[in-house]
Image (spheres, rainbow, N blue to C red):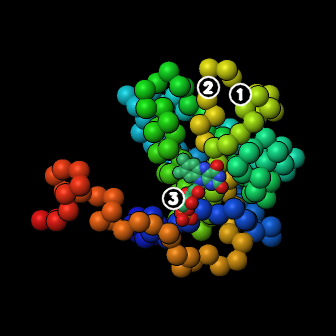
Amino acid sequence: MDTFDCIATKVELREFAKDKTVKAEAKAKILEAARLTGSSRNTQHWRFVVVENDENLKRLASDSTTGPWAAGADFAVLILTDPKIPGHAIDAGIALQDMQLAAWNLGIGSGIFTGVREDKLRKDFAIPQNLEVTAIACFGYPLGNVTGKKKNRKPLTEIAFGEKYGNELKLN
Ligand SMILES: Cc1cc2nc3c(=O)[nH]c(=O)nc-3n(C[C@H](O)[C@H](O)[C@H](O)COP(=O)(O)O)c2cc1C
């Protein structure tokens, strides 16, 4: 898929097909996208915990405050970053986006959440104290047809300016 089309058509999913499982090669490609992502000073401080087991996905859902739908995912990836690295959350964000786009290119949907019951999550997934659980991405084939789903976005004129904040953008 063309990169722009991938960005334009990718939507967040919170429901996943039960009857179609994601193959190991596809999972490996999604993780490879994360591995190839750049990071602050190329520190590559992120770590990824892949959760595939149904019981653990249910545990992940119960450890979340904003992602109860994680229980229905095919698999999930916990993105851990080192909070001592400046820009660590940006590093998590771009690795996450690269995984989501690599997945969407294969027809695999994804949804992310950040709200967690931290102590329980750390215990359940053996997260080291020096790493932060910055985001969690859940993957699976879409339930039903999600192509053409309209995105609710502000117009460019409201969010982008020319030369100085507030100036109308007129691209040359
Ligand atoms: C930093 C960040 C945190 C998010 N946290 C959650 C979350 O906790 N739970 C959730 O259901 N969606 C979460 N989302 C998903 C957003 O709600 C979603 O990206 C937005 O609604 C746009 O969705 P769309 O691309 O399908 O239009 C988060 C997105 C971002 C970028």
Q: Residue flagged by tag 3: what amino acid is it?
A: Leu
Q: Specify whether residue 56 is in view.
A: no
Circle 1 SS class: loop
Q: Which quarter shows the C terminus? A: bottom left
Q: Please name whichever residue, 151 or 143, is drawn nearer the observer in this view of the structure.
A: 151
Q: Which residue is identified by label 3?
A: 101
**Label 1 crowd (10 A; few <14 / some 14-19 / many >=20):** some
> Horizontal and vertical percent for residue 23?
70, 59
Q: Specify whether residue 70 is in view.
A: yes
Quadrant of the displayed image that contains ligand 1? bottom right
Q: What residue lies at 75% left-to-right and 36% top-to-bottom? A: 117
- Do residues under tags 2 and 1 come within 8 Å of each other at their CB atoms? yes
Q: Residues under labels 1 and 3: Cα distance?
A: 26 Å
> Horizontal and vertical percent for residue 57?
80, 48
**Label 3 crowd (10 A; few <14 / some 14-19 / many >=20):** many
Left or right placement of residue 90 versus residue 70 in this view: left
Circle 2 SS class: loop
> Horizontal and vertical percent for residue 101?
51, 58
Tell me, for residue 131, which label it has, or none. Answer: 2
Give the vertical position of 80 relative to 143 (above or below). Answer: above
Q: Residues under labels 3 and 2: Cα distance?
A: 25 Å
Q: Earlier in the sequence, mark 3 or mark 2?
A: 3
> Horizontal and vertical percent for residue 122?
74, 29
**Label 2 crowd (10 A; few <14 / some 14-19 / many >=20):** some
> Can you tell which quarter of the image residue 87 is in?
top left
Q: Please name whichever residue, 167 or 133, is drawn nearer the observer in this view of the structure.
A: 167
Q: Please name whichever residue, 53 or 154, is drawn nearer the observer in this view of the structure.
A: 154
Q: What residue lies at 46% left-to-right and 24% top-to-bottom? A: 85
Comparing labels 3 and 2, the label whose residue is closer to the camera: 2
In the rendered image, the residue lying farthest to the front is 166
Tell me, for residue 127, which label it has, or none. Answer: 1
Q: Earlier in the sequence, mark 1 or mark 3?
A: 3
